[in-house]
Amino acid sequence: MSTREASASAGKARDTWPAIGDYGLIGDSRTAALVGLDGGIDWLCLPNFSGPAFFARLLDRQRGGYFQVRPAHPSQRRADQTYVADSNVLETRFRSGTGVALRLTDAMTIPPSAAAEQLRPQRELLRKVEALEDTEIEIIFEPRPDYARARTALRRYGKLGWTCSYRDHFLLLHTDLPVELTEDRQSVRAIVRLQRGERRFLSLSYVRRDIGIILPLGNSAEQRLIETRDWWRDWSSHCRYQGPYREAVLRSALTLKLLTFCLSGAVVAAPTTSLPEAVGSSRNWDYRYCWLRDASLTLDAFVDLGYHSEADEFIGWLLYTTALSRPKLQVLYDVYGESRIPEHSLESLQGYRDSRPVRIGNAAWRQTQLDVYGMVVMAAADYVRAGGRISRDGRKMLLGFGKLVCQLWRDPDHGLWEARGRKRHHTHSKVTCWAALNSLLALAEERHLQVPEDGFRGELSAIRDAIEAKGFDRELNSYTDTFDSNEPDASLLLMPRFGYLPPDDPRMLGTIRYILDKLSSGPLLYRYPPGSDELAGKEAPFGICSFWAVEALARAGRVEEATERFEQLLEHANHLGLYSEEISADTGEAIGNFPQAFTHVGLINAALSLAAASEHGGSKPT
């Protein structure tokens, strides 16, 4: 984990943009909020990850809305953040010249199982303010529902607090601090003096189509924070990994759990939309959905760390979600399994540092990506090998995927990286089709299901013949991005993981050499050559691809080189150990949606590969 101390600049103007990485993430495995080093909650969607944003200052410093608690005096605003050990409870500490002046603790509360029947709001964001010196604090509560498209008046309900309603959404701010409504009724503000040792709470509760719930403050609020901390610590205690870099692995696991929608088992790619891959460009996408291409790698990470219940839920979501479209699969779905994710642009928000458009929804749901079949089948096969059981309906589903792969693998597709141009024959897509049939045949041999073995083996051989004839360049001694091309693609580093060939095969070693030579920027790795996707703006190195390089090197027995790259990548985490989608080659800053589940999956799998390679004397069995 990076050791740099992130700090908030004193007296920043309101329109100054913080770095993407200058945030911490809190959540309750239903939705999540980003908390800045200035004590501002700048992003929160309700009731779930892809619901409308009520705070969106992340994408518009003037109109987006936010909820801030910080020292009133600029001299006390130098801040750092940390998670309470082994949890997703976040502390922001504001320092004066003599020490910590104010401690702000943030969490989205999770009731213990024993309290499941108690009356609770659907969501609660709880903030505890502790004065460690005599200090004045500034409080600003400025909700802007529906991505700032709806401006609703705040109302006071006496001692019960302040309410904000939007259609059937209802927010209630309950606090023991003396805050007041502004004249325009659009925000609640206050500057309050606290004595050393004082402790105060702000509880923001949310319901939809239900009665409002007002939770008590004081000791009761303190207990809810303790219960939430203990819930996360108990979850962390089940991580069975005890190898090198455990702190970074556990933080990545905790991040994945935050991004897992507990009501269905889906894992969203990120909790944000439209954080740019290139500032000022149109490389802005909505990642608040679940991509099937991530399925195998995500499930591997959960299973290998000992989180079998998450794997059970993920497979359950997968079976439910694909029921309506099977045997065909879409690229992405929402957390409830909705298959239509229409994309459109918001005019209400400026965009992060004027990066437009701000998108909600994602048009990639209409694309053809053949790799999803291989990733889903491999996820199911890994699940079964880890002791999971697939229902009769699930076995029927897997067989249907195999038959469809036999029909479709010869077709071009849009590929793993969702290029919004013409379809092409991507080598990675063909490899994953091969892996789908290979996994199904292996399950049949292990008597987990029945398949038409002769037909599947014939197609398996045909796919390999096509890959070797058109996807491998003998002069380069490397597999290439598309058939009959010479372009590298980082996804080809996964071929040994998929069982296509041994990690020390000369063709694989040549592919590793070619990809690292053409796509590396120090320890960082581009997913494909910058500029080749014909989009405006400069492509940055991709987080998970950088970890794929570590895994490929470790599997090939180059453990020392892999370890060096891994440790350099750890320095690119933010101050809390969080990673974005991409990392700037020029500055090392976080780029794109944040935090990114796929990058944290890559870190976990790279660390596990390193540990296994070291244990096996420099090589990891495929």
Image (cartoon, rainbow, N blue to C red):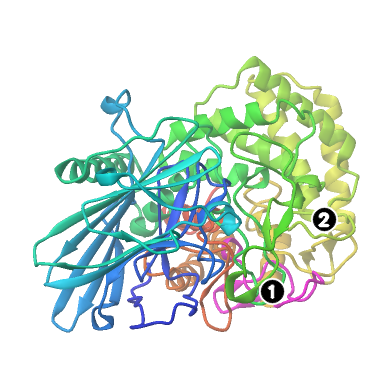
Vertical relation: 518 (above or below) 550: below
For residue 244, say whether it is visible: no
For the residue marked with disc 1, what is the amino acid? Glu
**Quarter occupied by the N terminus:** bottom left
- Total marks shown come to 2
Q: Is residue 532 visible?
A: yes
Residue 358 pos. (x, y %): 66, 63
Q: Nearer the viewer, mark 1 or mark 2?
A: 1
Name the spot of residue 499 as percent of width and height, x first: 66, 45
Q: Is residue 365 left or right of residue 615?
A: right
Instruction: Residue at 28% x, 32% y: name it.
Output: 112
Magenta stretch in the rendered image: 518-545
Q: Secondary structure at mark 2?
A: loop
Report whether 422 appears left or right of 342.
Answer: right
Vertical order, 520 against 439 (above or below): below
Main SS of residues in magenta: loop
Q: Which numbered tag is attached to residue 526?
A: none
Residue reaching furthest to the top: 392
Identify the residue position indicated by label 1 in the image. 539
Label 1 or label 2, whichever comes before in sequence order: 2
Q: Amino acid at mark 2?
A: His
The quarter of the picture where residue 80 lies is bottom left
Residue 619 position in % (x across, y down)? 52, 56
Q: Position of residue 192 (x, y in %)?
A: 21, 67
- Name the residue rendered at 72%, 29% in the picture: 441
The residue that label 2 is drawn on is 426
Q: Nearer the viewer, residue 331 or 466?
A: 331
